[in-house]
Image: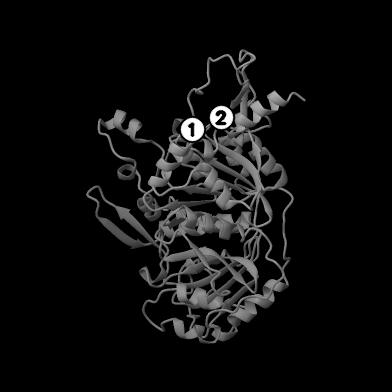
Amino acid sequence: MDSDRLEQLKRAQQKQSDAARPDIVTRVHDTGRLTARERLELLMDPDSDIPYGTIAAVDPEAGPDGNPWIAETGGLDALCTIDGRPAVVSTTDYTDHGGGYGGARLGRLIALAREQRWPLIAFVDGGGSRARHPRAGLGHIELSGAIGPYSLFDGMAELSGWVPTIAIVSGPSFAGHASVAAFSDIVIATAGSSIGMGGPPMVEAAIGKRLRPHELAPAEMQLENGGIEILVEDEHQAVGMAKRLLGFWHTPADTPAAAAASAPEIGDLISPAGSYPIQPVIEALVDAESFVELRGAFGASVVVGFARLGNRNVGIIASNPAVDEGRIDEHAAQKISRHVELCDAWELPIVTLVDTAGTITRWIARDGSATVESGLSRMHLRTLTAHQYREVPLLSVQLRLGRGLAPALMTGYSTGSRVPALVAAWPTAELNRAEGYAMVRDANAVDDVIEPARTRDTLIRLLTMMPHDRRRLKKQRPVDSW
């Protein structure tokens, strides 16, 4: 083969490397952030990547002294392994035309992820897809045409509910980039980043005022609104969290389970009356240092997340009596619904801890004042639909209160198509019924009353009787984008 042509190919592929762009690398590092290549290398196992789309076009008019190979720009798309398991990774390069999507082959890799059931991790900094490619009109022979059934958005929608999708936001993320995040199962954002559907230019055109990205849609605000799952300090922490979350998708190695923090004293962590935080109870129940909370600032009367129990990956849904006595408002109901869908899509058994004084609705007046009433909204009833279609096992423990319809929102109806595998209660549970004719779950219908110290062992024993790897053969339904 022509050695000159091979050398030209190598030069073109190296053109977008960090070594070839020291000025850009310095500019990125001065902001405390990583380059697109550094992000990929931090996430993947060493030398495990198979890049897609490094060459975008051929220039038929290059001539004998020119280089016919045209390097792709705007980011990196690759297959790789993460902790020894295959994954698709996309990282935009916001220093090149705003990191706009449209140049590389993410749609092609989405099709492979769908076919092979590989997870996808995407760094989504930038201003959206490219309206017009920077090479347009130059006479090149394009090599980056669509291969496969999907483009970007329809591909992300197709992956929803079938494989884990994780978006990392560590800078301004608007328009198409924010849409990719919205399609994702989990969004991890760094402090100081921003995410919104309309960027500063669009907002300026609409209201005549120029806002900086962080003024417009700060990640800290999105955490409170439920727009992101986890807020971390920097990209190193974001990558570490993404890898940790992927561990809940894969079957754990056959290793001994880490002990719980203080299982024998778990019953002392609740208050016989009044409020108490639920997080210490969760930590005492699950394997040590395995719990990861999601959307902690949103719908805070309920805590959701992932953990391990006896080295078994599980989803956690727990009332939080420290907030509104664990009452479930519309935000908490949305939080439960989506987490049931997420656990079902990731095929994780669900453990619920119930201590709730009922359901409430919040009415916001035009002047911004709020009225809180006992009652239900359609957001509450949506949780029952999520439970009705759930296929994974659910194990429930009532710690103390269980009033009104709230326990059914946590566990599903005990007469539904997917009944809980276990409904246990602690001796501190409220098992009487204040009103016997209410159309609510029968609070007396528990399988057993157990000692708090036996809870962890009971759950682990039951989980070992459940199939350990329930990889379904077809997609059941998508995970709600909210």
Residue drawn at x 33%, y 45% as measured from the top left: 214
Contact check, label 2 and label 1, Cβ < 8 Å? yes
Q: Residues within 10 Å of mark 2 (few under 14, many from 20)?
A: many
Query: Measured from the top left, where is residue 322 in percent x and y?
Result: 38, 72
Mark 2: which secondary structure? loop
Query: Measured from the top left, where is residue 46 in percent x and y?
Result: 64, 52
Residue drawn at x 60%, y 67% as measured from the top left: 414
Q: Is residue 247 above or below residue 207?
A: below
**Viewer-proximal residue, 56 or 282?**
56
Instruction: Choose top left, top right, bottom left or bottom right for residue 358.
Output: bottom left
Residue drawn at x 40%, y 41% as measured from the top left: 27
Query: Measured from the top left, where is residue 215 in percent x and y?
Result: 30, 44
Query: Measured from the top left, where is residue 257 in percent x and y?
Result: 65, 75
How far is disc 2 from disc 1 in space, using C-alphas? Answer: 8 Å
Assign the N terminus to one quadrant of the image. top right
Is residue 69 visible in the rendered image? The answer is yes
Q: Residue furthest left?
A: 367
Residue hosting label 2: 103
Tell me: 156 left or right of 297: right
Q: Amino acid at mark 2?
A: Gly
Residue hosting label 1: 100
Mark 1: which secondary structure? loop
Is residue 184 visible in the rendered image? The answer is no
